[in-house]
Amino acid sequence: MAPMGIRLSPLGVAVFFVLGLGVLYHLYSGFLAGRFSLFGLGGEPAGGEAESAVDGGSVDLREMLAVAVLAAKRGGDEVRRVRESNVLHEKSKGKTREGAEDKMTSGDVLSNRKMFYLLKTAFPNVQINTEEHVDASDKEVIVWNHKIPEDILKEIAAPKEVPAESVTVWIDPLDATQEYTEDLRKYVTTMVCVAVNGKPVLGVIHKPFSEYTAWAMVDGGSNVKARSSYNEKTPKIMVSRSHAGMVKQVALQTFGNQTSIIPAGGAGYKVLALLDVPDMSQEKADLYIHVTYIKKWDICAGNAILKALGGHMTTLSGEEISYTGSDGIEGGLLASIKMNHQALVRKLPDIEKSGH
């Protein structure tokens, strides 16, 4: 007798298939959701590079430079838009150590938000220090398209990987806020700096109102150069507007009556004064001197650019500045390029004392 044939019910097959899909959905829905959310943010899927990033991972300095340039420009757009609207919502954060008002405007706040969240979305595992407060409830997701501009690729052909935990980013969303409120636009910059193990390695200084951007990477490349010559004997010295009288007396005693003192706003502007900048509004100087306490987000980008071009930025006593720990330095500032920097330090023994 032949074995009885087995016939499968189409309805039974369909029910079995639907149940199977349900099991698979519950098993993998979380995994797929994670993948799609990361894809939407431009990130890597979980289990790949993102998983290693939990343990620190590494970052590419060339990519960080590309994002830093973009962040400075995005912030600059906000700075320019607010200034041109003439509605600054100006207020005071308190007093500086010199007793002046420490001002903040909508330009500072909106620029900070764009710059911080662009960098944080692109590099979530690095430490970011910024001048303005970041409101966690005001989080904004800003996606980087992972494109590196041609001018950066031309100068820096290969990736430069460093451990993420060694990186500290310093953001100044609006340098020269006092001058910004006075509509002295040429002094205003937005800046980003990346330090590795406390040493500045890449810097970006962007001028929102002329739309000029300078960037450089130590042992990498740059889109800006030093000038062909500097005057070391009777230099033009760039100083803060509030410190001009304080510095002038000592500078004249040190370098002679032919020395020029140029009062200016903004640390970014003062560093650019030492370089070959194709901006008609940019003044030129041979030295940059600051004689009081200064914040690291004001100076880190300029320090990195000078260092990449063979220049120097130290305290007035010649000490290197570390971009870890506290957010400011006490020892004043001396910046130079194509000069004997330590000889200049020895020439200026009294400025720090007069500054305090």
Image: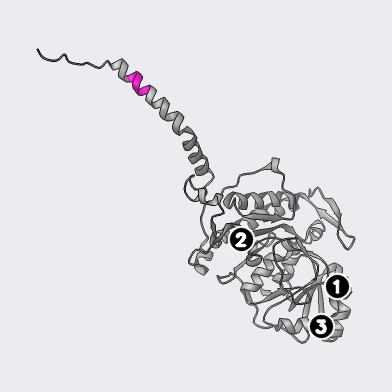
Q: Closer to the camera, 184 or 119? A: 119
Residue 48 sits inside the magenta stretch: no
Where residue 51 appears, x then y in whole percent?
Answer: 51, 48
Q: Is mark 1 on a helix, strand or loop?
A: helix
Residue lying farthest to the top in this orientation? 1
| 323, 85: nearer the viewer | 323
Q: What residue type is labelled 2?
A: Ser
Q: Quadrant of the N terminus?
A: top left
Q: Residue at x 56, y 49 (%)?
A: 54
Question: Alpha-carbon neighbours of circle 3 within 10 Å: few (<14), some, or many (≥20)?
Answer: some
Residue 155 placement, left or right of 180: left
- 87 or 260: which is nearer to us? 260
* Residue 255 x, y percent position in the rendering: 82, 85
* Residue 16 counted in the magenta span: yes
Sequence-first tag of 3 and 2: 2
**Is 10 on the left-hand or right-hand side of 293?**
left
Q: Tell me if residue 174 comes above or below residue 231 in the rendering.
A: above
Tag 1 near tag 2, CB within 8 Å: no
Q: Give me the C-alpha separation between circle 3 and circle 2.
A: 42 Å
The numbered dot on residue 166 is 2
- First in sequence, mark 1 or 2: give its number: 2
Badge 2: few (under 14), some or many (20 or more) residues near its Cα, within 10 Å?
some
Rendered image quadrant of residue 140: top right
Observer-nearest of 215 and 168: 168
- Provide the residue span drawn in magenta: 14-18
- Disc 1 marks a residue whose amino acid type is Ala
Q: Name the residue under label 1.
A: 244
Q: Name the residue under label 3.
A: 259
Q: Residue 206 carries which label?
A: none
Which label sits in the foreground, 3 or 2?
A: 2
